[in-house]
Image (spheres, rainbow, N blue to C red):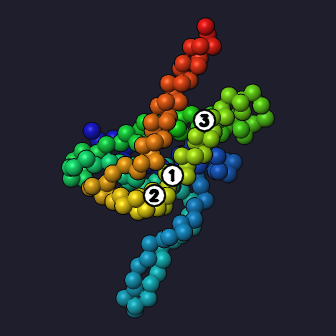
């Protein structure tokens, strides 16, 4: 299966909330621009300030992809992106929107989803993944393994979905 390989660690819907009215791009500052060695012996950094579309910002290829004993590119598994982050982003968008408003009932309705979204944001950046993986001896590349915390959250999100179904069934009774 070849799935989504360009993974956003800040969802596009969240980025769009920071675009100036009447604009369609973000003002973007690259804190680590690529460096080029000059023939004269100096170093020059690429442009670090520019405008860019949300589809091009806060994205990294294969950030959440896993490869199970096969060469990179042969079999890519994107279940972390689809089943964990996709689900959290889908429920997080209305939760963030609710808390940006003043409807207290909407806050109560989306309370759990907001904090799940905030919690997962701490784990999904390249820096957080590198920190979590290096402290556990997990390597990146063709032998990349899943971060235990992400697996925990995936199981928790499945349990939360099951408990919501049982709660709504009991309320209907």
Residue closer to the observer: 4 or 20: 4
- Disc 1 and disc 2 in contact, CB within 8 angstroms: yes
**Which is nearer the N-term, disc 3 or disc 1?**
3
Image quadrant holding the N terminus, namely top left
Q: Is residue 110 among what the camera can see? A: yes
Which residue is identified by label 1? Answer: 123
Q: What residue do we see at 45% from left, 58% from top?
A: 132
SS label for mark 1:
loop
Which residue is identified by label 3? Answer: 113
Q: Quadrant of residue 91?
A: top right
SS label for mark 3:
helix
Residue closer to the observer: 79 or 2: 79
**Which is nearer the N-term, disc 3 or disc 2?**
3
User: CA separation, marks 1 and 2?
Assistant: 8 Å
Q: Nearer the viewer, mark 1 or mark 2?
A: 2
Which residue is identified by label 2? Answer: 132
């Amino acid at each position: 299966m070849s799935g989504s390989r360009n993974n956003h660690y800040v969802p596009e819907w969240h980025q769009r909330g920071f675009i100036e009215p009447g604009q369609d791009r973000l003002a973007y500052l690259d804190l680590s621009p690529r460096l080029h060695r000059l023939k004269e012996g100096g170093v020059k950094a690429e442009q670090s300030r520019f405008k860019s579309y949300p589809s091009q910002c806060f994205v990294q290829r294969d950030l959440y992809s896993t490869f199970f004993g096969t060469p990179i590119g042969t079999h890519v598994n994107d279940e972390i992106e689809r089943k964990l982050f996709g689900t959290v982003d889908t429920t997080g968008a209305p939760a963030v929107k609710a808390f940006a408003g003043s409807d207290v009932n909407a806050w109560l309705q989306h309370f759990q989803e907001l904090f799940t979204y905030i919690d997962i944001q701490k784990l999904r950046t390249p820096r957080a993944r590198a920190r979590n993986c290096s402290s556990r001896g997990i390597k990146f590349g063709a032998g990349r393994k899943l971060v235990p915390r992400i697996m925990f959250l995936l199981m928790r999100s499945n349990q939360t979905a099951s408990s919501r179904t049982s709660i709504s069934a009991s309320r209907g009774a």
